[in-house]
Image (cartoon, rainbow, N blue to C red):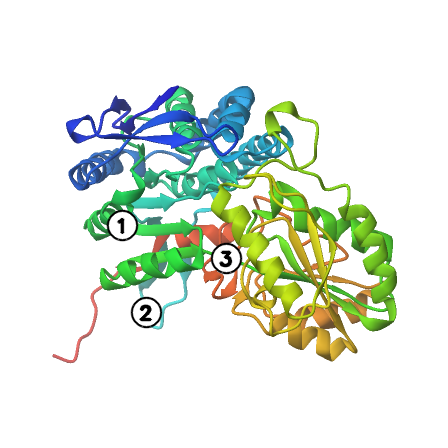
């Protein structure tokens, strides 16, 4: 059993009155983590600590921040086995998914380290003689990062890496479903040598989440909020941030379409669709949930995809025998079964799929999905692919956009010009031509449109999210004024 305390000012701290809660593993149904249950007063204290650390940290040189972030990357990757074990126990992830999380998280820290010298100001031409005008970029202050459980190391590190690179102090609110995994990130930052109070980690019990997040956002010292998670919760975070006029970066739900045109490389499209639909049991915001196939190649694609999908079997991730692990909860597995049942009842065909065994659910493929079915519109967040047959390219684009979400998409065609024309018409923040919908690179502008959120993580784009841009002038000689 792991005791996940708060990390405040570089010190392990119990919650007020020693309040705590247990995280139960979806793999074993046994408690695997005892985590501190932060109260509102604990949350306020953590912000005060981050605010006190900000003045000194904001003045550190890019070289210092770069060295610390690179050291954090090395420290994190050296603890890969600890992170993989924690992810398996708390979220039911496979070892491969855990290892990928650690690798990409390390890359995110290295990219953030490289960005420290890109937080730059500019000299702008002024209309006033003798005046030097500056577009001055500076740290925003205390940044609150809220990350989910499904890619906990990637998204946890992403919540704090660029804010730190931009010389902000951070509060990292852990997911209630993986407090150990997220708290390990705090251990990494402390071991890497970041000054006390620069990184603070706040776990909380599920019942206290709303009050704790409200208190964190409302605190005057918090200047930026980033949230990755469901659209439902993201709306609440955005509403709270808006009431307090806090800039907010949201990366929310998705229902990614993968369009297969009539000249597509079917084998390559099948490989990408299987990876996109079933990696991490389909519990990725970019997961391929809708495969939109032109009629002339639909039968060929479905036959090949079904053959591939029958290999997408799930099991206990601790045994490392099968490509898929477990769903995050029995309720999540039952919801996928309900979506399948609804589609079949309304005329769809279950091509591949078996009943769930608790949280264990094999990959499923449902053909002839129509707008009358829940599967057509609702985000699944599970190992299920809906196939929608269309008669033309225009119909494919219309259906791809007939969705409240707009995070990731993909188009398959041997004619890159045609595919690019389709990609430009799709309403999504990310689109890959002849590639899977699931892809992530630290330096890319990552984010969505519509109900998938706003703002961008990654590289240069993230600098604007976590800094203030000010206009500062210097007058070199006396000025004339009309009064």
Please report whichever mark, 2 or 3, sits nearer to the chain's N-terminal start: 2
Badge 3 element: loop
In the figure, is residue 447 to the left or right of 53?
right
Res 313 seen here:
yes
Q: Secondary structure at mark 2?
A: loop
Mark 1 to mark 3 CA distance (whole Å): 19 Å
Crowdedness of circle 1 by 10 Å Cα count: few (<14), some, many (20+)? some
Is residue 347 depicted above or below 250 in this figure? below
The N terminus sits in image quarter: top left
Label 2 to label 1: alpha-carbon separation: 53 Å
Q: Earlier in the sequence, mark 2 or mark 1?
A: 2
Frontmost residue, 217 versus 289 = 289
Mark 3 lies on residue: 253
Sequence-first disc among 1 and 3: 1
CA gap, disc 2 and disc 3: 51 Å
Q: Which mark is residue 129?
A: 2
């Amino acid at each position: 059993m792991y005791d996940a305390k708060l990390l405040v000012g570089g010190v392990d701290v119990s919650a007020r009155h020693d309040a705590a809660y247990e995280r139960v593993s979806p793999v074993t149904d046994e408690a695997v983590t005892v985590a501190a249950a932060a109260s509102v007063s604990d949350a306020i204290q953590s912000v005060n600590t981050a605010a006190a650390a900000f003045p000194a940290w904001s003045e550190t040189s890019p070289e210092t921040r770069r060295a610390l972030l690179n050291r954090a990357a090395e420290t994190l990757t050296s603890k890969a086995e600890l992170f993989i074990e924690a992810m398996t126990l708390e979220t039911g992830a496979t070892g491969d998914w855990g290892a990928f999380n650690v690798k990409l998280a390390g890359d995110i820290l290295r990219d953030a380290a490289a960005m420290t010298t890109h937080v730059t100001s500019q000299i702008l031409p002024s209309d006033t003689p003798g005046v030097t005008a500056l577009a001055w970029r500076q740290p925003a202050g205390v940044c609150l990062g809220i990350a989910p459980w499904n890619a906990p190391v990637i998204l946890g590190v992403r919540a704090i890496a660029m804010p730190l690179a931009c010389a902000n102090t951070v509060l990292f609110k852990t997911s209630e479903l993986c407090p150990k995994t997220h708290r390990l990130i705090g251990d990494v930052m402390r071991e890497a040598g970041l000054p006390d109070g620069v990184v603070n980690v706040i776990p909380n019990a599920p019942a206290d989440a709303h009050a704790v997040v409200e208190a964190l956002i409302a605190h005057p010292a918090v200047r930026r909020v980033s949230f990755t998670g469901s659209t439902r919760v993201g709306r609440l975070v955005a509403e709270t941030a808006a009431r307090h006029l806090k800039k907010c970066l949201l990366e929310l739900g998705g229902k990614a379409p993968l369009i297969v045109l009539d000249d597509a490389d079917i084998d390559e499209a099948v490989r990408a669709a299987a990876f996109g639909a079933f990696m991490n049991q389909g519990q990725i915001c970019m997961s391929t949930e809708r495969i939109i196939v032109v009629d002339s190649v639909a039968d060929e694609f479905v036959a090949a995809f079904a053959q591939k999908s029958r290999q997408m079997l799930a099991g206990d991730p601790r045994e490392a025998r099968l490509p898929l692990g477990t769903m995050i909860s029995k309720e999540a597995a039952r919801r996928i079964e309900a979506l399948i049942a609804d589609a079949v009842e309304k005329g769809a065909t279950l091509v591949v799929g078996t009943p769930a065994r608790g949280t264990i659910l094999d990959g499923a493929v449902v053909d002839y999905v129509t707008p009358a079915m829940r599967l057509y519109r609702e985000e699944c967040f599970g190992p299920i692919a809906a196939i929608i047959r269309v008669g033309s390219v225009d119909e494919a684009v219309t259906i791809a956009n007939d969705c409240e979400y707009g995070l990731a998409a993909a188009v398959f065609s041997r004619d890159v010009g045609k595919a690019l024309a389709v990609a430009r018409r799709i309403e999504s923040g990310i689109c890959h031509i002849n590639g899977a919908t699931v892809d992530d690179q630290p330096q890319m502008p990552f984010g969505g449109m519509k109900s998938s959120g706003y703002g961008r993580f990654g590289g240069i784009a993230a600098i604007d999210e976590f800094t203030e841009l000010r206009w500062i002038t210097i007058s070199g000689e006396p000025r004339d004024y009309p009064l």
